[in-house]
Structure formats: C-alpha cells, structure tokens
Image: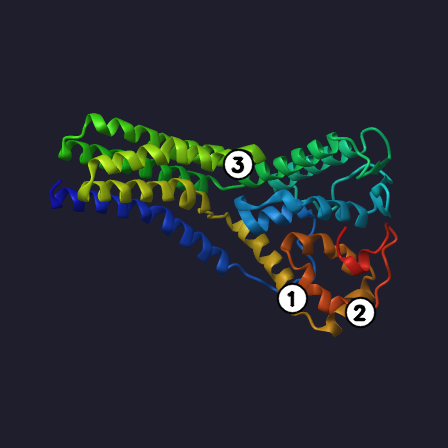
Amino acid sequence: MNVGLQVFCCILSFFVLILPVASIIIGKVRLKRALKPIDYYPPRGYSPIDVMIKYYGSHAKAHGLINPIMLYWASRGFITIEEDCKRGLKLTKLKDLKPPKHIIDADITAQENYEIELKYFNLLFGSGDVFYTLTADSSYNKTNNAFIKDCGTSARGARTKLTTGLSYLSMISAFIVAAINTLTVGLSTGSGPLMLMSIFPLVGMIAFRAIGNFDDDIAAIIKYPFFIIWGGVPLVVLLTMIGGSAAAVLGVSMATSAFVIDFLAERIDIRSQADIEVYGKICAFKTFLLHAERDRVETLIEDNPDYYYDILPYCYVLKITDKLMAVFDRITLDGPSWYLGDLRNTLMF
C-alpha cells in the first residue's frame, strides 16, 4: 500500500472526528454560558425526574431516582413514610397523585414525566393504600425497573432534533469512512476477498451502539462480550493476515470510527434555549446550596420550616447530600410530619 493511499485513509479518519468533537464543544459552551442567577429553590413545577433530565441531559442515569421520588411525594403530602425494622419501609397513600400546581404546560417533557410518575405511583398502590418494601413480591422489582427504564427513555427522547441529527450524521459518516478505508486497503493490497471479514467489525460497531440504547441489565452485560467476539476477534485476525502499514492504517480507521459511533456521537448534546435557561436555574440552585452561608440558610428555614425536606429530593438527584450535611447538621431542624424514623440524621432510607 503506497504512502499516498495511507495518507488519504488517515485524513479521512481525522475528518470523521471533526463533526462530533465540534458539536460536543458547542453544546458544552452553550451550557457554560447559561445565565445562573441566585436561586434558593429548584425550578418551580419540576419533579426530580424533570431536574435529572434537564441537568444531565440524555445521559441522565435514572437508577438513583427511587428514593428521591418517594421523598418528593411525601413532601407534597401524597404519602407518609415509616421505618419498619421487619418489613422495610411502610408507605401509606394519603391521596391520589396530582400534578404540581406550577407544572410547565409548554414543556412536553415535563408532562410526559408526570405520566411516568403517575404510572409508578399507581403500580405501587394498585392493591391497597399501604405498601411495605421488604415484604413486597418480585413484582416490586419489576415495577422499579420499569420506572427506571421509562425515565431513561424519557431522557433520550428529550434530545433536540439538532442533537439527534448531528449524532446520526456523525455515526453514518464514521461508518462510511470505515467502509471506504477498508475497500481502499483491500484493493491496494490485493486482499479483496480477505476484506469480507471486515463486515463483522463494521456491523459490530452499529450493533454495539444499538444494544447500548437498551436500559436492560442483560444488554449491559452482553454488549462487550458480543463486540469482542463478533467484531474484535475477526478484526485482529484480519489485521494479522494483512500485516505491515496497511494493517496499521486499517486498525486506526476502524478504531476511530468505532470511537465516533459508540462514544462521541452519543455525547453530542446541543440543547434548546428553553432547556439551557432551566439548566442555568438548576445550576444556580446547586451553587447556592454548596456555598450557602449558615445565616442565609437559617433565614430560609425561618421563612419555610420545611425548606430542608422540600429540597432534599433534588439534592439526591444532584448528588450533593453529603456536602450539605456540614451546613444543615449545625441547624436545629424538626423532623417532617410525613416521615417516622431517622431521616434527619441519615439523609437517606
């Protein structure tokens, strides 16, 4: 394989990186420039599910939402929570779930998330107004897994059309470049028939990405072994048989395309202006809590004795509960009426 063709293949592999990398940078710069005025509360009308998606975007991980959503229901008066050493937590339904008074009508994602929340609530209390977490049958795990899966699907569905378009364009470009470079190497080395083995890693790239879109424990377990067996092994055999600089060029091309398809394209996140504004409010709320002075927090609690418990579900979502302990541990707080147990000291259940 002559030097000119090697340079051609390397240039193609380089250019396939430009679109996803530039898109990722633009998305992060737009978020960085979001206005972040001081805010003592999360955005009004948004549930922990909404805050998770608006803050983390399509990469939001819903596995930690079970506790926050139950605290959220309790703080709004829909359930009470009681610790039971033998049967886990006793959840008592007080009334049917209703949407927040300030739910954002123009935000379709928030409306869809409420439907997910309502479905989960109704499944938990479908057979009665009292639910014990440790004595529940296997359907409880299925209910939780379904809720987590629905939240993950909502997060991916909240991506803008521009983000989705750039993501698919990046993947298609990377796949085409890998195919062109494979054909170029095969024709230049006279290994055309041998190049048929490249079908396996090419298909493996797409299959790996498709499997990764499933919020399923089994999918998470099998996708790496699948890619190694289906794509990795044939590719290693192919490169070994070709050898020399041609193998190096083909290896770099395949690795670059796989990196774009299965990593970079997924991380493109260019949000709408409305989502950026909400993101800025969440950041402002988080920043205030992390840097709040004790006097200011005490003033907020004097104005709203339930302030700490109102914001606690969102602190879980933002992963800042441990950092807040130093602030709130020095402030005298009465336990919430809706929780019978040691919530004040443990910050968790």
Give the residue type at disc 3. Ile
Which callout, 3 or 1, points at the residue further toward the start of the chain? 3
Q: Quadrant of the N terminus?
A: top left
Q: Is residue 9 above or below residue 279?
A: above
Q: Residues within 10 Å of mark 2 (few under 14, many from 20)?
A: some
Relative side of 166 to 293, left or right: left
Whether tag 3 and tag 1 are in contact, CB under 8 A, the answer is no
Mark 3–mark 2 distance (CA, rounded to whole Å): 45 Å
Which residue shows up at 66% across the image and 33% down it? Answer: 146
Which callout, 3 or 2, points at the residue further toward the start of the chain? 3
The residue that label 3 is drawn on is 221
- Is any part of residue 175 visible from this angle? yes
Q: Nearer the viewer, residue 241 or 337?
A: 241
The residue that label 1 is drawn on is 290
x, y percentage for residue 102?
Answer: 72, 47
Disc number for residue 331 = 2
